[in-house]
Amino acid sequence: MDKLTPLTLSLSLALAFAGAAQAAPDDKPDLRSAYTKYEFRIPMRDGVRLFTAVYVPKDASKSYPFLMERTPYSAGVTVDGQLRYGVDFYPRRLGPSPDFSDAGYIFVKQDVRGRYMSEGKWQEMTPHARKDLAPGEGNESRDMHDTVDWLLKHVANNNGKVGIYGISYPGFYTAASIIDSHPAIKAASPQAPVTDLYMGDDSYHGGAFMLAANFDFYAAFTEEKNPTMLPKTWDGFDYGTTSGYDYFLQRLTLSNMLADMQPKQQAYFKPTIEHDTYDEFWKSRNVAQHLKNVKAAVLTVGGWFDAEDPAGPLLTYRALGKHNPGIFNGLVMGPWVHGGWAGGDGKRLGHVKFDSKTSEHFNKKLLLPFFEEHLKGVKPAQPMAAVHTFETGTNVWRQYSAWPPAPAKAKMLYLGPNGTLSWSQPAQQASAFDEYVSDPRKPVPYIGYPATGVPQEYMVSDQRFASSRPDVLVYQSELLEEDVTVAGPVTPKLFVSTSGTDSDFVVKLIDVYPADYPQDKDEGQHKDVAPPSVPMGGYQQLVRGNPLRGKFRNSFEQPEPFVPGKVEALNYQIGDVQHTFRRGHRIMVHVQSSWFPLVDLNPQTFTSIPQAKPEHFVKATQRVYRAPGTASGLQLMVLP
């Protein structure tokens, strides 16, 4: 085993992969006075060595637990915009929040196998059960076991207990590391964990490719020959325009978009496009099925407005509960974007307010007490509930024994004539339907302003720009006379037909604010002419939206074409919510066939979309039916 001498030797696409932690500015507490940094290359059972930075409290009068983070985004520190390794460089903070360094832990940060200064070969979402490993490839559970074994033996003043946490990809490594877990691992918190890339996390939603986010991410997350300190910076892709909509539409096909990338940018990106069905490539990377023999207490964390991994936390929570009865299996869902609890106050998202510092509440009242109890034996002031969720709309924290909460009952909200929504089935009509023409060369944008990448605000963005389009069906309720609280999965149940042979159907659940909703008091305080403010009266807040690629209506493994004009049933989930539509608001539903460039274009011709040619992209007439027997609507889990 080697202890390293000081080494002389980013653009953050998601807050959670701030793997290269920022160096401490002058106005922050000096961690040097309390912690000594060491760097090690820890040997795995196959001889591969993993780079590991360890920060040990200088106060040696007592013992401390380990708190680990394993990351593909570098265990180094960013100084003046450059990635640095070496014992002289300290990060801005240690642990999930400043309270952790004050409380005292031995902090460990490790470059996972194949990334940055670690040896070995990296694999996308390391398949847990893969047998035919290439030289240098490994298994995250075994790498964690070997790391823990080494740390317990070689780092002084440890109390024999280990915790692990991480956000986004490090959230995946947290979950994967506790399978068949080392007995010293007592607590784990996978946060915004990537869990099943194809089934609702980063890569595919409803079988549709999440184009804008993945293109932007893989343009920067590139393959490098390791061990290496490269890339020292994360450089954004040069789109040559401020509009991702224009950039991608001009190229139209996925092959044209790939052609704009360098070979090293394509290395990780191309396989995610080529595997456009739920094949073995994706199935082997679904970590949820392997979350067994977990001995640690687990607190899984997610955000209701996570644009990258909205499904992962709930899938992880359910899998842990299914396979590991008897452990503490906790869940926290707050009003956050991807990793927002670690980098912001959590008081608002765009124009939508949550009224309190939800991130501070989570870090001080939930996360720190969780690790203090299971790693140090510090009993919390009151026992932790199994489920803590933030209810948007009312902006209140709720506690439950399970998710979804048992009192929530399924209730159908039906699409009606003249753009109405009702809890009652529509009256008898022979052939009631609404229709629109979907043109893939004039797709519906997912935001009403120009941007590249994916603005995190889109998850609550004002939908008035889309409501006025002729290729978006709009349905809304009467003014609500009492609050309606939805807690659980949102399930569109549609009857549709198309004149094409494939189509996407995007469903959005929207909260329409009253016309007299109060304006933000901070706006309008200018002496000069101010830019136009967004009137909050009538604001159409996206609550949840997602697509279904129609050819996957029966199976994500075996796509099937539509028969033009034939009525087909679509039944799929667009994600979980906990949201109260307040008295005086309205509930709105959109149905459309593009959401660009958040989602790649469906050519509306049945084909393998990665190989689609420009001539495949054709207009199609879509119909959504609402007669008895073919009554379309949304199934909502409504609390009494």
Image (spheres, rainbow, N blue to C red):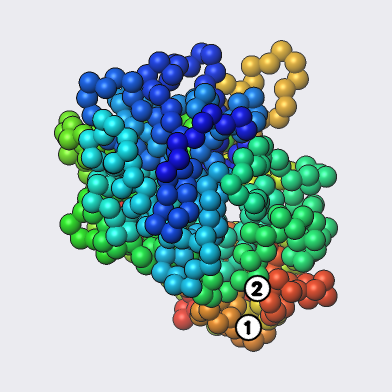
In the image: residue 602, left or right of residue 459: right
- The reply to whether residue 484 is in sight is no
Question: Would you place residue 107 above or below residue 512 in this image?
Answer: above
Q: Is label 1 in contact with label 2 (beta carbons under 8 Å)?
A: yes
Which residue position holds label 1? Answer: 562
- The reply to whether residue 182 is in sight is yes
What residue is shown at x 30% (from left), y 25% (from top)?
103
Query: What's under tag 2, amino acid-wise?
Result: Ser
Query: What's under tag 1, amino acid-wise?
Result: Phe
In the image: residue 409, left or right of residue 210: left
| 626 and 353: which is toward the camera | 353
Label 1 Cα neighbours within 10 Å, binned few <14 / some 14-19 / many ≥20: many
Question: Percent x, y for residue 259?
Answer: 80, 61
Which residue position holds label 2? Answer: 503
For this orientation, the residue located farthest to the front is: 1
Instruction: Looking at the image, tell me whether mark 1 or mark 2 is earlier in sequence order.
Output: 2
